[in-house]
Amino acid sequence: MSATNHQQGLSNKRKGEQQRNTGLGLAGLIRLATRFLWRDLRGGELKLLTLSLIMAVCSVTAIALFTDRLERALLNESANMLAADRVLSGRQQPPREWLQEAQQRGLQTGEFISFASMVFSDQGNILVSAKAVSPSYPLRGDLLVADEPFGASYISDAGPAPGTVWVESRVLPALAIEVGDPLYVGNATLTVAQVLVQEPDRQQGGMMENAGPRLLMNLEDVPATQIIQPGSRVSYRYLFAGEQQALNTFADWLDAQPENEYRLRDVREESEEVSEALDRAESFLMLGSLFAVTLAGLAIALTARRYSHRHFDHVAILKTLGLTASQINTMYGLLLGILWVVAVLTGSIAGWLIHEAILALLGSLMQVALPAASITPFFIGALTALLCLTAFALPPLWGLRSVSPLRVLRKDVAVDGSSQWLPYTAGVGGILALILWYSGDLYLTALIAIAVSLVFLVLALASYLLLKSGTASGMRAGSAWLLAKSALSRRSQQSVLQIMVFAVTFMSLLTLSLLRSDLISDWQAQLPEDTPNHFMMNITAAQLPGIESFYEQRNLEGNPFYPMMRAALLTVNGEPARRPWDDDEQPRNLTERAAEDSGAGTAAPASADESGQAATVNESGEVGDTESVRPVTRQVTWTSSLPPDNEVVAGQWWDEEARPGEVSVEQDYAERLGLSLGDELVFEIEGQRVTVNVSSFRTVRWDNMQPNFFFIFSPGSLEQFGATYLSTLLLEGEQKLMLNDMLRAFPTIVVLEVDAIIAQIQRIIFQVSSAIELIAALVLVSGALVLLACVNATLGERYRENAILRTLGASRQLILRAMLFEYAFIGAVSGMMATLGAEAALYFLQTQVFEQAFRLHIWVWLAGPVLGTAIIAGIGFAATRRVVNTSPLLVLRQLAD
Amino acid sequence: MTVMVEARQVGKSVKTHDAQLHILSDISLVIDKAESVAIVGASGSGKSTLLGLMAGLDQASEGEIWLAGELLNDMDEDARAKLRGQSVGFVFQSFQLLPSLTALENVMLPIELKQDPQARHKATQLLQRVGLADRLTHYPNQLSGGEQQRVAIARAFASEASILFADEPTGNLDTETGATVIELLFELNAEFSTTLILVTHDDRLAARCARTVRLSSGRIVGDSAKASPAENTGSVTEPGQESAQA
Ligand SMILES: Nc1ncnc2c1ncn2[C@@H]1O[C@H](COP(=O)(O)OP(=O)(O)O)[C@@H](O)[C@H]1O
Ligand SMILES: [Mg+2]
């Protein structure tokens, strides 16, 4: 009978199906999703998730906006340092067609020639570094001029007109002339039209171009001077500015030119000191936004997990009522979609406001006008939110589709096992994708992935063990501790997770803030306020007493005088010396660059030719020395006391009665040469051989803009050779005028003025430091969100437990104290882990990414656990007070649904 | 008579960590349209499991189940969900209201699932019918247990389902509240002439149904519709050796 009856039932049903469409349409699902969202948002369920998401968008957008504008400001600033976006320079004039080619590609071009020259007035003469510029100079940045020496400055629209020159203030008193008077450059008579106060690229190029005060003239006037002769020491520079894209294709085109040894360079290649600061800042900003997003992602993952757990039952009900798995997916997908839109909108606005607020705060300190923001940061923020949602929130919700409707009958029906792992895999994958996206560095990403998984493994194991031992040892602490202890071990898996989340959060915060203070203090140590900003070279031994008394009369504080000479390293232990670099014979540091350019420190010190007409400084000694394997020569010195910022890392620095015949080698250089302590080195100086033994290795701060040497000989080793001396001097503001007096008194001295570049680097460092502070603060907020999310994740259970304990007669006081203990313990353990992890991370980051020296932060070893305890206990206490203050009856009733 | 639900030699076993646990064995049962059946038995005898299988919430390990003319064995979870949405209403011991939705929205949901534009109107009427006209916008946690169960009953009838499954609907309620809820359930059942399958361990409640099926240790040990319970014992099938009919 039944078969026919079933047929009948079936056909009945078919009929019914035709009458009414089954299933909920998209509109219905949207309605359902918004209802869920609305209720869960008000009920607090989704509040943290949304907040975290908004926080992710907000911090990423704010950081991106800020860095975008700051980076472009820095780019402008550094372009200013070049007076162009890219430059090309050489001792020979590069082909002029290149300038035309660049113009055809839509680039702006400019050029100048620089050379050192004696200039004369009827009353006197002075060695200047002359710069003959094309009318378009400078392409970037401004020329500041004044109408009288040391007068008020203003921006000039154009460079000096043909027939005129601009000179720096101190030239005028040195020549005893005024603005409007004539001045002789070579064979040309030119009129002083303005006082030059500042030029953007004052410190670019060889040090020779900065020896002596600047004289700016028009390129057209160069032939009339007849200064530039074959063999003259002149440098040519072409300037280019324009769109990044056009610059890059032009650079490629240049590289493709046959027999071209010129290369387009940007400021990073031109100035090591600046590029290092910029690189580090970029790494830090990248790291900061990464941490902020990772933490926000962690918070999202935690809340989404909790949210999806709470929704298991809802899904079972919906399925019972007839919703299919795909409808459920669509509904939760829509829910996330709405959440995304809300978060992107609010987060973008908040991010904009925050970045504006910070700019306003920094406004008075910022010395550069920031360019307007681009749209990219908002795009990055929106994409980050999407990535966060897909990686952290979607996977737990995705698992909902497989919830069995049977849950309406049996709570213990397990959720499909495979989906349990999806959230973790996706979360980790998401974080790695973020790292890859932000860093664009596959190697770094892989390294971090390995490091993080190791740290996680160790953390999990260690916190598990600590939990075990902690719960076993706290027996005497009374019933509150007993309660806490049993809670910890009852939830041991959850507690381990909690400790790990807290530890990772603290670790991120610690790492970032330690990195921040290390970077900033490192920069401050690199170029402190009173960094000497003038190099004096070519000083003879006979001049030393005179200079000392010159200082004394003018209350100047002198610095050590280093004797300097060129030495070629011939053999190491009898074997010919290796070349430390493949393309050697380049000056390798500021000291050598300065020495090369000024021609100082050679066996026969080249001095400015003062005889009159052909007043260029000639190329010194090395021309024509072209054998293929000639020994590497370096500027060397001897001194009895270790120069500042040098640190002996192996062997011993000589003491008072130093024996001749010892040498101290810079560590990195020694490594390249394959040296060990005690090795016998033979140098050739002025054609004579000198044999010395390596007695120590030193580290040197190359970026401190101070005299630094690869080889320092012990006193007595080199005294038979004629050395010239090098020293530095701090001259600020009006003090610069004393240079005139000094040069008049000691005309053979060459002074290199590095004050402008030091000021510029200090400015960049300041900007970068402020950016870093800001980002550390944003990451702090993200971290706080994670802590909240994590504490909240266990609140539901705590409500239940509290209700049960209270009905069993435990006092509120007792429960509160137990919770405090529990949180304090978790906080202490995670603080400890975080300290360990942060030091490990710092070691990695500082040695691999930031190229800083790593030092342990001893005080953190105490502060980490203490802070961890205090913060977690505080947050936990605040959160659980609510738990304890809710009536148990209410709790049990709420839990029933 | 139209058959609403038929079970043929149904068995259910689950794998626990150490052994195969047989929850139900050899259940054969035919329930006709508009019949009211009580499934009784001690706690743990398999009542809820049987209900879940007949309602298409779970798959049987052995045997065949027809629900509203469709063979459940052939259907995947999505198809069963559609069938549930079409033909089945539920009332559970633990109410199972969606906490995110108001009473009205909870009742509207199954009507909306059928894309009925009258959802709000019909849901309001049903809630009036169960005496909750003034609680439409309340959320489940603002309602008492009895009120929640009345919302659940309104929801169960909202989809105009032809079969209603109720799993211990009074289990979480005190006697008095339970009694009112039961009254309501039977009243509405009569009004809509729904097939009612009610799981309970309360014999007095069972007595209100036209037919009683008694379970013990996963087997039917009594069926008031049959002359003698012994009739069933003749058709025991070995597990795995299922009837070949499709
Ligand atoms: N998925 C399952 N896994 C393990 N045991 C189950 C499962 N479903 C039911 N059981 C067991 O089968 C027996 C019957 O359960 P149930 O149908 O809920 O009984 P009743 O509703 O009659 O109290 C119980 O012992 C229960 O523990
Ligand atoms: Mg049951």
Image: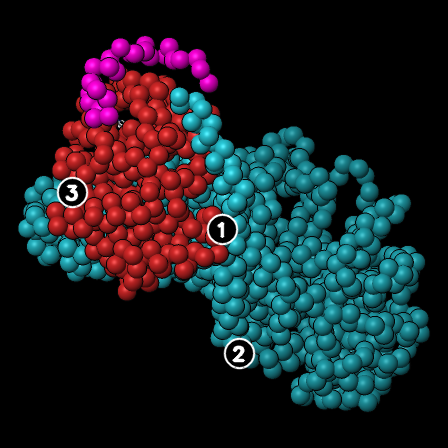
Of badges 3 and 2, the one in the foreground is 3
Per the image, label 2 sits on a secondary structure element best described as loop
Which image quadrant for residue B54? Answer: top left
| Image coordinates for residue B77, horizontal then vertical, percent | 44, 33
Q: Amino acid at mark 1?
A: Gln
Which image quadrant for residue A560? Answer: bottom right
The magenta stretch is B220-246
Q: Which chain is cyan?
A: A
Residue at the image position 47 percent from the left and 27 percent from the top: A7
Q: Amino acid at mark 2?
A: Ser
Q: Note whether B193 is above or below A783 in the view shown.
A: above
Q: Badge 2 sits on which subunit?
A: A
Q: Quadrant of ligand 1?
A: top left
- Using residue A72 as the reference point, say whether residue A342 is left or right of it: left
Residue at the image position 61 percent from the left and 37 percent from the top: A673
Of labels 3 and 2, earlier in sequence is: 2
Residue nearest the observer in this picture, A460 or A275: A460
Give the labeled residue for mark 3. A485
- Using residue B19 as the reference point, say whether residue A340 is left or right of it: right
Q: Badge 3 sits on which subunit?
A: A
Q: Which chain is red?
A: B
Q: CA distance from mark 2 to mark 1?
A: 62 Å
How many numbered circles does the render carry? 3
Give the labeled residue for mark 2. A364
Q: How is the image coloured?
A: by chain
* Label number found at residue A507: none
Which residue is the extreme one toward the front?
B1
